[in-house]
Amino acid sequence: MKQPDRSGERGGSKLKTVLALLIVGFLIFSGVKIIPAYFANYQLQDSMQTEARFAISNRKGEEEIREDIWKKVQELEIPAKRESIKVSSSQGSVTISLDYTIPVDLRVYQFNLEFHPHADNHTI
């Protein structure tokens, strides 16, 4: 008994495999470009919240708070300007905010991730 000729069917499964690998590769590449920005923002948000909570008990002024946040921004390599760190402190209340944008280049698509971390000590 002769086997049916299936030589024309092989290319379809190879094409699907290559396409699936390209999609998985692009997702991994995208994740490597995007996830660190969100992780850095999370770390900055956490530092800002800690700074806001303990600023009054540590008797820190607005400039000292701003300097501490600026050091964290530099440590995390976040593309923000020192002037964009907004700190207000009055009558036992501290509020810290920062707006910054991280450009992401996926080679075929470019976009900006905008972050607006904010912290205060009102929830204590």
Image (cartoon, helix red, strand yellow):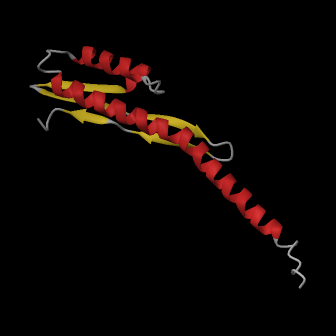
Q: Residue furthest front?
A: 1
- 6 w.r.t. 28: above or below: below
Q: Residue furthest bottom?
A: 1
- 60 w.r.t. 96: above or below: above
Residue 13's x, y, as percent? 75, 66
Assign the N terminus to one quadrant of the image. bottom right
Residue 86's x, y, as percent? 31, 27
Residue nearest the observer in this picture, 99 or 71: 71
In the drawing, does residue 122 fall left or right of residue 82? left
Q: Quadrant of residue 49?
A: top left
Q: Residue at x 48, y 40 (%)?
A: 35
Residue nearest the observer in this picture, 78 or 30: 30
Q: Residue at x 32, y 33 (%)?
A: 45
Assign the C terminus to one quadrant of the image. top left
Residue 52's x, y, as percent? 21, 27
Residue nearest the observer in this picture, 13 or 49: 13
Q: Quadrant of residue 17?
A: bottom right
In the drawing, does residue 112 fall left or right of residue 48? right
In the drawing, does residue 29 fall left or right of residue 73? right
Residue 41's x, y, as percent? 39, 35
Q: Residue at x 68, y 42 (%)?
A: 107
Residue nearest the observer in this picture, 99 or 50: 50
Q: Residue at x 78, y 68 (%)?
A: 12
